[in-house]
Structure formats: structure tokens, C-alpha cells
Image: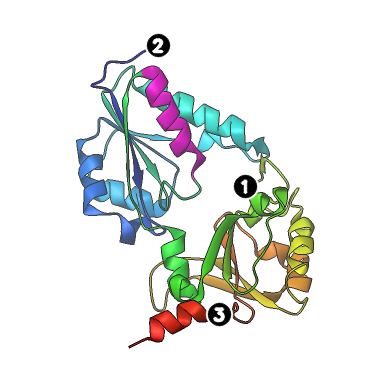
Amino acid sequence: MAFAQSKRVHLIGAGVSPDLHFTRLGMRQIEAADCVVYYADPNLEKVFDEAAVENRVTLDDLYPHGGVDDDSYQAVLDRIVRLLDKHDYVVFVQQGNPRLGVTLADMLQEASIAEGFDFDVFPGISSLDTLIIDTDRDPLEYGSVIIDANRLILFSHKICPEFDYYIYHICSVGTRKTNIDDPSADNAIGLLQEHLLGAYPPEHLCKIIESNGAGVGSASIVVEVAIRDLPSALDEVTFGTTLFIPSVGRPPVNQAVLDLMMAE
């Protein structure tokens, strides 16, 4: 089934805390939309209520506990595309930044080509933005690696401990299941720990962070744990947590480059 090019699906980032982070650009799309699709969130509902958004469709029934990620993504994609039968302009609101760890962004882009509707993405404040505040570190100053937990171990990523690491999706190490009610279920976090111990001393401290993004005095949850104790901290892991591993030491200096930078 092909749609007229006038049909549009726009993916809008709602930020980490939607009631604080929703952009004016995003709100303009919301106000112009025929239908708004989203995952339930009290803060997001507050935004929609204030903007008098009437035609809303939630997606929570398509993301069951224990389901398989790919099946849930496909069900969400199918629902969004079917809405174009009745509506010309559908806005899909996604928490955070829709281009950071959001598989549906790529799936919607592919569907737009196959089905013939317009697709665009509008930014939101990501957890990476707020993690930078939570860790009180400039990721450029220290040098940083941002990586998904499963990709880190699946592809045997060679860790460079002299750089900071932001490891996403530690809620689903070694599993494709969406265990919403209990992220510790089926979580093979020991595989991640084993890989980390190949690069860090067991006593090296890292942080499990559930970022709130509200700035100073925010309700971000930060749990410090040694890598040797990572499996025992699994109860602290939620679908909103990221593992931050600070660097150990500094990388060797390229003297030729340093001389060039210091030359008068």
C-alpha cells in the first residue's frame, strides 16, 4: 500500500523530562498534528493536557513484559503506518532524543520510502545531555565512548580505559526480551562484567545512573559500584539507566602534536 506524498509522520523528541524539555519546535508539530502517538508518561500527559491535544493514541499495549524487542517495534510501526489511513499528519512522540538508541527511527525511515509518506525527525534533549551534567564531566575534555552494552560484548569491542565510557541498555544484556516489570530477568550482566574486567581493575568504581535531567538538585539516581560487584547491583538497573565508567589514567601523548600545539 502506497500513500500520497501529502501523508506525513514526524518523530519528535520529548527529552528526558518532557514537562521540562519539550521544545517549542516540537510543540508546534504537536499542535498541527491530526493524531499524536506516544508511550504513556505522566509528564507527557501533562504537556498534552496543557496543549489541549485531543486525538492521542498510546502504544503501551504493544510493548508487553517478556515480549521480544523486534516484535514490539514491528507492532508499533504497523500501528503508526495504519493511522495514515485516517490521518494526513501523525506525530510520534519519543522520550529523549529520537536518534539516540531508538530503533524505530530507522524503521520509520525505511517504511517512508517503501510506503511513500514523508518522514522527518525533530530533536529532544537526550539522556547523554543530562548524563554530562550528572557526571560533572566534559566528554570532550576527557575523551568518551558511547556504546550499547550488547554491541560492546557482541563485537568484542576493545576497551580503551583511558577514555570515559557511557554504556547504554545495561537493562537487557544478552537478551532480546523486553522485561519491563523486572529488568533483572534474563539479564546476563555477568557477560558485561567479564568483558570490563579485561580492561579495568576489579575495584574500579563506576556509576549506574538514571538521569532526571532537571539540573542541580534533580532527582537523578546515581549508584556507585565497583566493577567486581556489578551483578549484585542489578536491582538498581532500570530501563532508564546508563553505566558510566570514568577513565583510568591518561592516554600517551603524541609529542610531535604537542610540540606543534605549544609552538609560539
Give the mark, 1 or 2, whose residue is nearer the N terminus.
Answer: 2
Where is residue 194 shown, x and y percent of the image?
Answer: 79, 62
Q: Quadrant of residue 19?
A: bottom left
Predominant secondary structure in magenta? helix
The reply to whether the C-beta atoms of the residues labelled 1 and 3 are less than 8 Å apart is no
Where is residue 8 shown, x and y percent of the image?
Answer: 29, 28
Asked if the magenta segment contains residue 104, the reply would be: yes
* Front residue of this view, candidates 181 and 264: 264
Mark 3 Cα within 10 Å, few/some/many (few <14, many 20+)?
A: few
Quarter of the image where the C terminus is located: bottom left
User: Residue lying farthest bottom?
Assistant: 264
Give the mark, 1 or 3, whose residue is nearer the N terminus.
Answer: 1
Front position among marks 2 and 3: 3
Secondary structure, mark 1, is loop
Where is residue 46 shown, x and y percent of the image?
Answer: 32, 52
Residue 146 seen in render? yes
Q: Name the residue beneath numbered marker 2.
A: 1
Q: Which residues are magenta?
A: 102-115
Residue type beneath disc 1: Ile
The reply to whether the C-beta atoms of the residues labelled 1 and 2 are less than 8 Å apart is no
Q: Name the residue beneath numbered marker 1.
A: 180
